[in-house]
Amino acid sequence: MARLADYFVLVGFDHDKRGSGDGQGRIIQRFPEKEWEDNPFPEGIQLFCQPGGWQLVLERKSPNFLVAVLTDINSERHYCACFTFWEAVESLQPQQNHANVTDEEDSKFIQAPQLFAPKSLVLVSQLDHTEVFRNCLGLIYTIYIDCLDFPLETVIGNLLTCIVPITGGSQRTISLGAGDRQVIQTPINDALPVTGCSVALFLKQLGINNVLDLFCAALTEHKILFLSSSYQRLTEACRALLSLMFPLKYSFTYIPILPAQLIEVLCSPTPFIIGIHSSFRADMQDLLDVIVADLDGGTVVIPECIHISVLPEPYLIQTQTALCMVLDPELEYADYAFPPSSMSASSMKFQDKEIRAVFLHLFAQLFQGYRWSLQIIRVHPEPVIRFHKVAFLAQRILLDDDFLIKVLDGMAFAGFISERGSPYRACDLFDELVANDIERIRSEEGNPQKVLKHIKEISEKLHRNENPYPAVAMHKIQKPTEGSHLRLQRSTFPQLDEGMVQWFIDQASAKLKNVPPAVKVEMKCIVPMGHPTAAIDRNGIVLANSARRLEVVRNCITYIFENKLLEAKKLLPAMLRALKGRAARQCLTQELNLHVLQNRAVLDHQQFDYVVRMMNCALQDCTPLDEHLVAATLLPLVTAFCRKLGSGVTQFAYSCVQEHLVWTNLQFWEAMFYNDVQNHIRALYLEMECDHLTETGSVNGEREQKSALGVAAEQLRLWPTYSKEKQQELIDKEESTVYSQAIHYGNRLTYLLLPLDTSKNRLLRSTAIGDMESVSNSFVTNSIAGSVAESYDTESGFEDAETSDVANSVVRFINRFVDKVCTESGVSSDHLKALHANLPDIVQMHIETLDAVHRESKRLPPIQKPKLLRPSLLIGEDLVMEGLRVFLEPDGREESMGGSVGGPSILPAEGAIFLTTYRIIFKGVPTETLAGEQTVIRSFPVASFTKDKKISPHLRAEQEPQDRLQLRSSTFQLMKIAFDEEVGSEMVELFRKHIHKLRYPQYVHSSFAFTVGQSVKQVMEPKQKEKNPSLRTMSKNIMKNAKKTIGRQYVTRKKFTPPTLDQRGIPAHGDNLDQISVSDEMEQSALTLSSTIRSSDKSTMSHMIERACCRDYQRLGLGTLSNSLTRSKNEPFRITTVNRMYGVCRSYPSLLIIPQTIQDSTMQRISRCYRQNRFPVVCWKNSRSKSVLLRSAGLHGKSVVGFFKSQNAPTAGPSQTDSTSLEQEKYLQAVINSMPHYADTGGRNTLSGFTSAHMHSSDSSDKQRQPKIGVLIKQVMGGKEDVPSTFSRGVLGNRARVITLANPRATLKGRESPQGKWGSIRGSGRLSAYSLNADVGIRLAGKETLSLQANGGPSDSHYFRQQRVGLYIIGDKSQLKGAKQDPLQQWEVVPIEIFDVRQVKNSFKKLMKACVPSSACTESNTSYYHSLEESDWLSQLHKLLQVSVLVVELLDNGSSVLISLEDGWDVTTQVVSLVQLLSDQHYRTLEGFRLLIEKEWLSFGHRFSHRGAQTMASQSSGFTPVFLQFLDCVHQIHLQFPMEFEFSQYYLKFLAYHYVSNRFRTFLLDSDHERIELGLMYEEKGEKKSQHIYKSVWDYIDRLSKKTPIFFNYLYAPEDGEVLRPYGNISNLKVWDYYTHETLSEGPPYDWELVYGRREQVDDGERMDTMAPQTHRKIVWPCYDNQNKTEPDAISKLLEEMQVLECELGQVPGKWKETWDKIKTTQRTESMQEGKHLSSSSLLISSSLSHHRRSQCVYLHEAAVGSTLNLSLDTDSSTTSTPSSGIMGRKSTSTLYSQFQTSESEHRSYEGILYKRGALLKAWKSRWFVLDKTKHQLRYYDSKSDVDMKGIVDLAEVESVTLGTVAMGAPKNIEEKAFFDLKTTKRVYNFCAQDCQSAQQWIDKIQSCLSDA
C-alpha cells in the first residue's frame, strides 16, 4: 500500500520578480507543509510546471495537463502532475513602480491591455497513475471554476490521505468527496512496465526503423533527445522507449520534459534520454553527439560522428518482420487475389502489448543461456554473483558482435545482473521466456506465422498483467462546463485553509497507526536455468574442411606422444595453420588433457618443444576475447607438462609461454579465479548434502548434475531454517575456500609472470599499465569491488623508481589482483594481511627455483641451426660485416604468407643479414618445413635505405630473439628482422652504425659508385689523396680557361676540396647560389662572345660540342656551335656559351639556347629576376608548328611586380619602367618573334602580321582539337563546369591576359568591365560544356570556329588574328598573385596550383606504407586502397599528366610555352620532360630517352644528391622521389601506348631502382658544375675502362642491350609524327607493379649479373653434373619466383632457342637484334607482296598493328565509358573513348578487329542505309549502319562493302530514341516521320531513313537492343 499523492502544491506567477526577460514561478501553498520522512519534497518543481518559462499572455488559454518526471539523488522517480490554467492579473502595480513619470501620465489616456498569468495545480507522487491524476486535478479545477458547493480543503485532504495498493492486480475505488468515483487498477506484477497505449503511439509517430535505431542507441548508451510541441507526448515517448528496454532498466539521466532554464543539461557528457519542446529546435544545432527524434515530424537525425551498433543478424530482420506483421497484418495478404476478410489491426491497447511482446521475444533470444554464464562466488551471508561475459559470447559465437558486446558492457546490463542474478527470488514473464520458451523460439525461426502466434500469446500475458479484471465500476468525474475558462472570473484561485487540510492528514495518519502494517508476501522460488545454449555458427564460419583440420590436430598430437617425431614434424606446419581456427584450438586443449595423468605429464626434450610450440601458436593467433578462452583452457596444462633437466630440476611449460599479454590482463585472472571459486563452493555444499544423505540412508543420483546456481538456490531457500551457529559455520567455510583459492592463484600468477631469466623483466616492462589496471568488464553483485588496498593502488606503474627488479614488479601486480578479488569475495582483513605478507616469500622461492631451471636449460645441447648461406656479390662489392643470424619476419604483404593466392608460407625465414658496400642482403631458408628447401633472398641498396626503427617483440615459437629492427628502403622494400640470441646487442648497434655511415657518407665521392673495387677499409675511411689525376687535370684546365675568358680571377681554389655543408646541400637563393659570379661592371667585356675564343679553349669547346644535349639541339634545328663560333644570322635561335664557366647560373648547363637577337651581355641581368638565376631558355622546338618549349625557375617576388606593367601607367613612358623588366620583356618578345606566325614585316612586334592564309591553313584535325585545350585548361586550373561569360574576349586589342584559373570568386564589377585584365574559369556563369570548350579553344588556339559574333566583336579573320597569343607562361599561382598585366603584351600567364616537394615527400612516405605495409591491416581505414587514396600519389600523377597534355596541346596549336614553376629543377623538369616525350617520338626510343634524361634532368641541374639525401649534408632534407614520379608518369603513358615505346617496362623499373642505388655515377651530384668539380663530366680519351665496373648506367644498358632483349619492347611499331595524349584521370592510372612486386628467390631483378648471370652458371653446372632426365614442370609461386624468367614471352623464348641451336651447330651465336630485324624485314616484305594484312596465325606482330595505339593488343583496357572500344576517327563522330593519337585522318584502327572475326554476319543484328547529319559541318551523308547486339553498338561505314568503320555509337551511352523533325539541308522528298534522333550522354545524332516504316523499324530495333541490355 502507498499514498496516491504525497504533496499537493499550488504554484503561481511571481509578480514580485517581474522584470526584463522571462518571469518566474513561486510556490503559493504546499500541503502538507511538513515533509514526509520516506519521501522528501523535490526542489525546483516550479520550473517543470511551465517548461517553456513563466510568461504573461494577452489571451486566456485553455487549461493543459502534463506529467513531469523528477529523479532524486537515490535514483527514485517522482511523478509531478501539473494542471495549468490562466487567471487575469488583478493589478499592474508592480509595473507602475518601475515606470517613470512620463509613463504614468500616458497611462491616463491609454488603457493598458488585460494580461493573464499561469497558475498550476501540482500533485507529487511516487506512483505513475496519469489518468487518475488528470481526473483529480480536473475535479479541483471544476469546483473552482464552476463554483461548486464542495470545500476544496476537503477534496485536497481526501486526496492526500488516499491509500492505494501498488501491485497484486486488485482494483480500488476512491472518492474525493465531491460526488466523484474512480477505479484504480494495479498490475499483477509491478516488475513489468505499465504502458497503456504509449508504445503503439511511439511506433506510429516514428516508424519501425527509427524506433529500432533509438532502441539500439539507448542500449549502447548514446544521447537521445525527443522533440515535440506536446509535453505529454514527450513523456509518453520516453516512457515507451524505457518500456521497450525491459528487462533492462535505464540508469542514466532521464528527463521526459526539460525546462528551458535547464537547457544546458544537453551538454552533459553522460548519456541521457531527454524531451524538450520543439520551439527550442534552434538551440540544438551545436549538439554534435546527440540523436534527435522529432515526434511530430516522424524523423530521427543521427549525427555523422555517431555510429550506432545495430542488432546482429538474423535478429534484426526477424524483429523488423515481426513488427510489420503486428502493425500492418494486411501486408502479408495484400497481393492475394482473395484476401481474408477478417484481417485487421488490433486496437491500440492490444497493439501496444504486441509490440512490447516483440521486443521481449528479442531479449529472450539475445540473452538466452545467460544464466549458464553466471558465476556464484559467495552464497552466504549474501549471494555474490559475477557474469562471465567472454564465456557467454563464446557460447553464442558472437565474440565479434559489436552490439552485444556494448550491451553487456553497459550499466543497464550491470543492473540486470544485480537484480536478476540471484538464483532464489521472485520470477516474472521474462524469466519464463528465457528459461522455458527458448526451444520453441528456435523451432519457430523462419516461420512468421508461428512467431506471430507466440508473440500474441506473450502480449496476452502483458495485457492481463495490466488489466486482470474487466472494469466493473464506472468512473464518475465532474468536468467544467464548456468554455468556462473564458468567462470573466470574479476572483483568483482561493487561498486554502492550511489548518483544515492538515487536520485531514493528521486524522488519516492516526488511523493508519492503529492498522497493522501490510506485509508483502514475496513469492520467491528457484529461478529456472533453462537449457544450455548450444554453439550455433550463424555466420558460416565453420569451413567445409574443418573436420579434416581437426583430424590433423589429433594425428599430430598422437604422433608426438607416441614418439613418432618424424611424422609429427611433417604434420606440424599444417597443424600450426589449422590452429588459426577456434575449433582446432579447442580440439588441441581437449587432446592435451587426455595425456595428463594426476596433474603431471613428463615429456622428453623434443616432445616438450613441440607441445610448447603448439601452445604458443594457439595463443598468438587469437582475438583478445578468444585469447581469454584459449588461455583459460591452457592454464591447467602449462603447470602439468614438464621435462626433467637434471637431478631435482624440472622445467614446466609455463616458463616457455609467458610472452603473451593475456597473462598480464586482470580481467582474465579474475574470470579464472571466480570460476575456480564457484567450482569449490559447489563442491563444498554438494559434499555437505552427500554427508546428510549418507546419514539418512538415501542416495541422490542427480547430485552431480546440479549446477552451482542450483546448489546456491537450495542453500538460499534453507538459509532461514539454519541456526545462527550453523549460519556462521557456513560463512567461515566459504571464506576459507575463497582464501585458499587466493593463495593458489598467487602461486599461479607467480608461475606465469616470472620469466625464466629473472634478470629480464620483459613481460611486465613491455605492457602498458592501463592493461593491468583496466576495469573488469564483468559484473559482481553485492560487492565492494572499488575498494582496493591503498598501499598498492597508489603505485604509478609496475616498476618502482627505486627498485625496478622483477620480484617487486610481480609482487605489486599480484597484490593488486589479490586486493580486488578478495575484497569482492568477502575475505577477512586478517586473511588479506597474511596473504600480502606471504606473497614476497612465494615469489622469492620461485625465483630461486627458476635460477636452477635457467642454469640447467643453458646446458641443453643447442638446437641445430641451419647453415648460413653466403650471398653472391657484384664485382667490386665487398662485405662490411659478416652475416648476423636473424629471422626475417613477415610484414603486411600477405603473398609471402600464402595469403589469398595460396602456396606455402615463405616467411618467416631463418638465415643471416649481410652488409656490403652496396647492399643490405638477407639470405636464408623458410622456417616452414614444406618450403624449407627454397632459398629466400631479400635485399636493397644501402643508398636507398630510408628509415630504421626498433620494433616491439613478437612471439617466436622456438627462440627468443633479443633485438628486432625494421629497415625500410625507397626501392619499396621492407625488412623486419629479429636477431638471434647469439647476436649481442652491441653487434646490432654496430650494424646500425655501419648502415648509417654507408648511407650518409660525408662526401659524395665516398659512395659506392666511386669506391667500387676499393677495400672495405678505404670505403669506411675515405682517402685524403685524390685518386684520378687525369680527371683532376681536366677540372684544372676548365677553371683556368674560365679565368682567361672572364678577364678576372673568380676561382681561387688550386686543388679540389670537397664542398662544405654551407656550400652544398643547402640551396642558396638569388645571386648567392653562384660561387663563380660576374659583377655588373664587367658584363659587357666578360660576357660578349663576339670575339674568337683563344686556342687554349679549343679542347673545352670540343668537349662541349660532344655533349648529347648539343647534338639534340642540332637535331631540332635550334642552332649549331663550332670551334669558330660561326652561326647563321637567319636562325631564330642560337647556342650561347655565356654560361660556359657557370658564371650566370651554376645549376644550368654550359651551352644554352636563347633567341638570336638577345645579346649575351643582358643574360646576367635577366637571370637575377628568377630564382636560382635560372632564366628562360629554349629546350625543344615543334618541327610542325615551329613553336618552342622554354623552361625557367619562378620569378622572384620583386620581379613579379616588374614583370607586369601597371594598369594605370602611361603607355609611352618606358623610362618609368625598370630596365631589367624591359630586358625581360624584350627577351620574351624575341621568343614570340622567332616563330614565323608572329614575324612582323613592318618591324613592330605585334600580332597583326599573322596572315589570313596561315590562319586558314590548319586542317580539320586541328579544328577537332580546339575544344580539347579548353577542357584541359579547365581541368588543370578550375575543375568546375561553370565558366564566367567574360572568359572570351569581347574588346578588340585586348590581346594579353592573365588567366587566373584557381580563383573561385570573381566580382561582378570585374566581369562587367570591358577593360578587365583577369578572368576566372571557376566563376558562377553557367555555359554549356560545348560552348565552354569552343570558347577556350578560340582563346588558346586562335582558331576560327562557331559563332564569331557571340561577344559582339567583329567577325572577320583579322579579329581572330589579334586574339592569337604567342607565348603562354605557366607559373605558380601564389607567385603571380596580385599582379596586373599590360594589354599590349603578347603573352598570357596561366597561374596553376601545383604540389611542392614537401607534398611529394609526404605522399611517397604514405605510398610506401600502403604498398609495403609493416603489418597486416586489421581495420578498414588502414586497408590497401584506403591507404593508397590517402597517399595522394595518383592524384599528383594525374596533375602532372594534365599539365603536360595541356602544354602539348598548346605547342601543337602553334603557341610557345614557358614552364616557370618553383626553382625550375623539380616540377618544371617533370613537365618539360613529359611534354617532349609526348610530342617527339625520338624521345621514346632507347637512345632518345637517354638523351632526354641527360639533357633535362642531368644537365639542367635536377638536384639528385639533395633530393635523394645522398650525403650527410642532405640527410635532414629527407628523400624526395621527383625523378621516380616522372618515371611513373612514363609508365602510365607506356601502359596506354605500348606500341610507341622502343623500351620496355623493365627499362623504367631498372632506372627507378638504380637512380637511388648509387651503383653508377650517372645520378650523383646536383649539376654539371659539381660534376666538373669532381672530374666526372668528361673522361680522358685514353682512360682505360674496367671490363666489369661501369661508371655510367648508360654504358651498362648499352652492353646489356647487345646481349639480351631485356630492355626492348617487341610491340614497338612507331607512327611518324605521333603525338600522344594519354588519359590522366585517376581511374585510368594503375599502381606501378614496381611498388608491389618482389622476387624472394633471387632478390631485386635489377642487378643483371646477380640474377641472370648466376642462373646461367648454375644451369650449365647442372647440365654437366647430371645426366638424369629433367622434368620441365615447375611450380611458380607469387612473390617468390621471377615470373619473367620462369615464364618468358614467346619471342624471347624463340630467340633464346635460336641461340642454343646455333651453339649446337657450332656456329657463332648471332646478336638478337640482328635476328629480330631480319625477321621483321622479311615479314614486312612478304606483307607488301601479299598486299593485305597478315592473318591472325602469323608468328609475329605485324607492323600493320602500328595503328593500334593502346594496350588492347595485350589486354582490354578500361575505357571511359563501358567496355566498348570506340576507335572511330571520323570527323563527325562523338568523342572517342581512347587516347587521341594526334594524327587525324589516317586509316581506321577498327579494321584490326576484322582480322579475328570468323563470320561477319554473327555480329550484324540489323543493317541498312541511313542519312546521318554531321556534328561540325551539319551536312547530311548517306552511311551504311550496322546494329550489333553482341557488342552493344551501332557502327557505320561508307558503303555496305566497306570494311573500314567510319565511327561507332556506343549503345551504353544512349539515353533516348525519339522521332525528329526536318532539319536544314536534309534529303529532299523524305517524309517527316522518317526522321529520328538518337540522344547519348555526349551529343544528339540526327538520322533520316528512306521512309517512315524504315525509321520506325530502326527505332524499334534500337529500343529492343537497349531493353535487352
Image: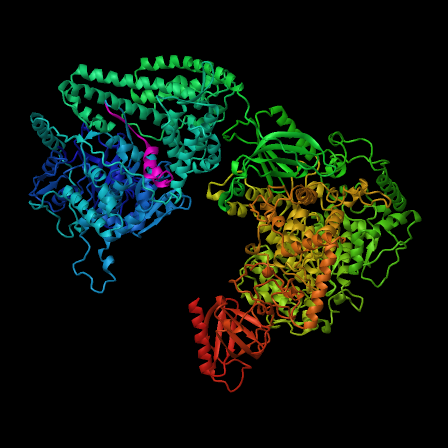
Q: Quadrant of the N terminus?
A: top left
Magenta segment includes 405? yes
At horizontal 23% and vertical 59% (from top left) the residue drawn is 333
Specify the farthest residue to the bottom. Answer: 1869
**Quarter of the view holding residue 132:** top left
Decide: is 620 above or below 1128.
above
- Res. 1543 in view: no
Q: How many marks?
A: 0
Indicate how the structure is coloured in the image.
rainbow
Where in the figure is residue 1607, as x and y percent of width and height?
69, 52
Q: Is residue 1436 left or right of residue 372?
A: right
Left or right of 347: which side holds 996? right
- In the rendered image, the vertical position of residue 793 relative to residue 1432, given as above or below: above
Residue 969 placed where, x, y %? 62, 39
Q: Nearer the viewer, residue 1212 or 1875?
A: 1875
* Magenta segment: 382-406
User: Which quadrant of the figure has residue 1732?
Assistant: bottom right
Determine the residue positioned at 64% across, 36% down: 921
Q: Which of the pair 1214/987 is nearer the observer?
A: 987
Relative vertical location of residue 834 with respect to residue 1435 in this rendering, above or below = above
Residue 834 visible, this orientation: yes
Return the x and y of residue 1204 as percentages of the image width and height. Answer: 70, 55
- Residue 850 image position (x, y, % from top left): 47, 17
Q: Please tell me which residue lies in front, 688 or 1093.
A: 688
Is 60 on the left or on the right of 1819, as rendered? left
Query: Which quadrant: the C terminus?
Result: bottom left
Magenta stretch holds residue 1046: no
Closer to the camera, 1256 or 774? 774
